[in-house]
Image: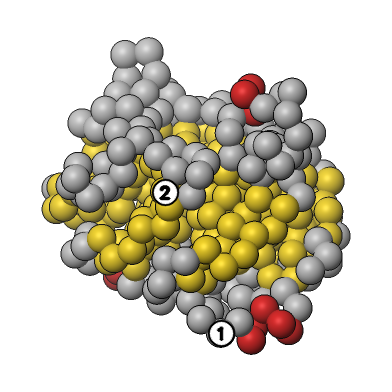
Amino acid sequence: MRPILMKGHERPLTFLKYNRDGDLLFSCAKDHTPTVWYGHNGERLGTYRGHNGAVWCCDVSRDSTRLITSSADQTVKLWNVETGTQLFSFNFESPARAVDLAEGDKLVVITTDPFMELPSAIHIKRIEKDLSKQSADSILTITGIKGRINRAVWGPLNRTIISGGEDAVVRIWDSETGKLLRESEKETGHQKPITSLFKSADGSHFLTGSLDKSAKLWDIRTLTLIKTYVTERPVNAVAISPLLDHVVIGGGQEASHVTTTDRRAGKFEAKFFHKILEEEIGGVKGHFGPINALAFNPDGRSFASGGEDGYVRLHHFDNDYFHIKM
């Protein structure tokens, strides 16, 4: 599996997202400039210029015409994918962390960080097809969570929101009322901040990664803990294969702790686990810093990783990978 190295960012990667067809890969980084690449060969297609801070997260509409990005510059921006034109900007009073488009692309969930006297919050906003009717107002705002909310995604049929962050608790909220429906228990849940959250292709379960050196698989409706994958380093990013019963976990020590060590000492590799058996089945090395972002192509035949080293690495699986017997 020889990776394709994609160098287009000047600062550490923060997030990766494929479009629905898998032919485009969007990357976010601390260099203020979201970038789009061809999903099969890593060729850079273009950048989206307009943010003035680190870009933490992005999502793309089902028809691949619109991109939405969240940034430390206290804005969430909507872009035309093809032209790179900025279509709309949602302005906040604190850094915007996570974004996730609802099924149908008519709603978006956004999280904002604690800042000055402001608490962290989850916002739901409407996305209009006709941008002349676009409003900046939130139709629902949820507050009361201590610490930063690192990820928030939509649950089945857009009826719920699933969130996770610094307080190590996974929560499920009613997306219409903002009522808290369920939260993970301290005994079975994560013990340190949740860094990442990834839904399965069928939307029935999701995977969380944490600085407690584990990833956990949950039922998306009941919040029942299904599986736990234990590794020897903090987890920054997780993803679930849409094709095989595999999950991939990435992370490593913080960059400040490994400036004098090599990539092996920092454990900068993407580790594959069998989703059902919880056993580690392989790893992919290469990054010269912690892995901050992971994404599977929707066809399941390749995956991308983004690191503290500023590189996106595109990995195409060879045929042997699809004949792994567990």
The amino acid marked with disc number 1 is: Lys
Q: Position of residue 170 (x, y in %)?
A: 28, 47
| Element assignment for label 1 | loop
Along the line of sight, the residue nearer the viewer: 266 or 146: 266
Local crowd size for mark 1, using a 10 Å CA cut-off: few (<14), some (14–19), many (≥20): few
Front tag of 2 and 1 = 1
Point 26% across, 28% down: residue: 146
| Disc 2: which residue | 214
Q: Position of residue 127 (x, y in %)?
A: 44, 54
Q: Is residue 169 left or right of residue 9?
A: left
Point 37% across, 13% down: residue: 116
| Element assignment for label 2 | strand
Q: Is residue 129 left or right of residue 6?
A: left
Q: Which quadrant of the view contains residue 115?
A: top left
Local crowd size for mark 2, using a 10 Å CA cut-off: few (<14), some (14–19), many (≥20): many
Along the line of sight, the residue nearer the viewer: 312 or 212: 212
Which part of the image, by quadrant, shows the N terminus?
bottom right
Q: Which quadrant of the view contains residue 258?
A: top right
* Rendered view: 81 above or below 76: below
* Rendered view: 144 above or below 152: above
Q: Position of residue 43 (x, y in %)?
A: 85, 60
| Disc 1: which residue | 325
Point 74% across, 64% down: residue: 315
The amino acid marked with disc number 2 is: Ser
Residue 269 seen anywhere in this rendered image of the structure = yes
Q: How many marks?
A: 2
Q: Which quadrant of the view contains residue 202?
A: bottom left
